[in-house]
């Protein structure tokens, strides 16, 4: 499936950018038109680019490096109108932004991770995930405590996230809830069909996932709401047995996700939903600590 994205470039440099993109075998420019949303007199044009890989992004950055400083004001225009200046980002972040801005991402599992967004994955100190209480689905106060204490993963579409965490980390759905006008959470009883819920505008607002002591919350945001992908990832530290680490490593490879770090004593990876996981054997933290993952 081809990727499509919109580049906003100074009108005086449109020919040079067009020539650079044309050198990439699997990329081409479909349309060139006046830029939108900046007024009538802005000196920019929009280039609609289609490509089967992201070699075109690397080619654009090579052209910018050859152009020299001050770098030209080339921007990626998102579907919601936001603009990302290429000279303020890098190849990894632009690739991630293009992936998430595709219209089909809302319906399929995005294979984000083949790039390595190293600048925002600094080896900062990781905090142990806080211990969270048992959830009582019939008690709104219990739902609120669980929502406040377990790590929150913001997403636009809940179903792909549920599928990913079940397939990779064996995290099971223990409950779904909607937020009422007063801010309280109420559990959704009975069967839940994500497609029908979306058609009826009755989607869940929060999904509670857990596997043994490891518990996280998926929090749904409106699809037009910008999520902080690529800038402030959620950091989660969990423990598992060495056999589980090996199994998870294999599942990540099947999902075409790159490991940030991985050996017998530690597994670190960024998932498609802006979470950086650091997983270590339970004995490496405390010999008496049981593994967070079960199964």
Image (cartoon, rainbow, N blue to C red):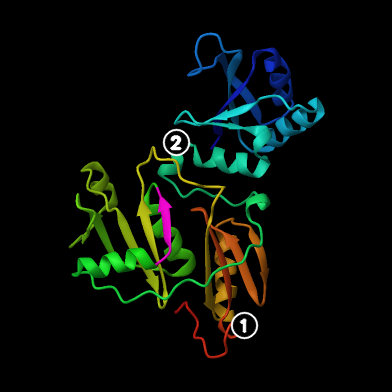
Tell me which residue sits at (31%, 77%) in the image: 134
Q: Residue 160 in the image: x percent, y percent? A: 41, 53
Viewer-proximal residue among 127 and 265: 127
Element at badge 1?
helix
Disc nearer the start of the sequence (2/1):
2
In the image: residue 192, left or right of residue 106:
left
Label 2, on which residue?
103
Residue 116 in sight here? no
Residue 274 in sight here? yes
Q: Is 45 rendered above or below residue 140?
A: above
Viewer-proximal residue among 66 and 107: 66
Q: Is 153 rendered above or below residue 130?
A: above
Q: Residue furthest top?
A: 41
- Asked if the residue under mark 1 is in contact with the one under mark 2, i.e. CB atoms within 8 Å, the reply is no
Tell me which residue sits at (56%, 73%) in the image: 247
Q: Residue 265 in the image: x percent, y percent? A: 65, 77
Which stretch did the figure color magenta? Answer: 150-155
Viewer-proximal residue among 100 and 22: 100
Element at badge 2?
helix
Q: Residue 42 in the image: x percent, y percent? A: 57, 13
The quarter in which the C terminus is drawn is bottom left
Q: CA distance from mark 2 to mark 1?
A: 43 Å
Label 2 neighbourhood size at 10 Å, few (<14), some (14-19), many (20+)?
few
Viewer-proximal residue among 183 and 30: 183
Label 1 neighbourhood size at 10 Å, few (<14), some (14-19), many (20+)?
few
Label 1, on which residue?
284
Snapshot quadrant of residue 137: bottom left
Chief secondary structure of the magenta portion: strand
């Amino acid at each position: 499936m081809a990727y499509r994205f919109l580049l906003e470039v100074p009108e005086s440099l449109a020919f040079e950018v067009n020539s650079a993109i044309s050198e990439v075998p699997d990329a081409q420019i479909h349309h060139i038109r006046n830029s939108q949303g900046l007024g009538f007199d802005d000196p920019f044009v929009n280039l609609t680019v289609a490509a089967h890989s992201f070699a075109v992004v690397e080619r654009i950055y090579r052209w910018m490096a050859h152009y020299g400083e001050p770098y030209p004001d080339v921007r990626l225009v998102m579907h919601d109108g936001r603009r990302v200046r290429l000279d303020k980002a890098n190849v990894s972040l632009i690739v991630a932004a293009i992936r998430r801005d595709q219209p089909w991402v809302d319906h399929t599992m995005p294979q984000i991770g083949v790039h390595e967004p190293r600048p925002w994955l600094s080896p900062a100190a990781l905090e142990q995930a806080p211990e969270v209480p048992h959830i009582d689905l019939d008690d709104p106060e219990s739902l609120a405590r669980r929502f406040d204490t377990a790590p929150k993963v913001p997403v636009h579409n809940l179903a792909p996230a549920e599928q990913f965490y079940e397939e990779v980390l064996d995290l099971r759905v223990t409950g779904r809830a909607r937020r009422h006008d007063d801010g309280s959470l109420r559990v959704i009883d009975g069967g839940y069909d994500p497609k029908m819920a979306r058609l009826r505008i009755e989607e869940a607002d929060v999904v509670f996932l857990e596997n043994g002591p490891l518990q996280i919350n998926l929090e749904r945001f409106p699809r037009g709401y910008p999520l902080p992908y690529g800038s402030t990832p959620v950091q989660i530290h969990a423990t598992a047995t060495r056999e589980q680490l090996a199994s998870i490593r294999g599942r990540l490879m099947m999902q075409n996700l790159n490991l940030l770090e991985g050996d017998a004593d530690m597994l670190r990876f960024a998932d498609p939903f802006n979470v950086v996981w650091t997983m270590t054997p339970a004995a490496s933290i405390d010999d008496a600590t049981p593994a967070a993952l079960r199964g």
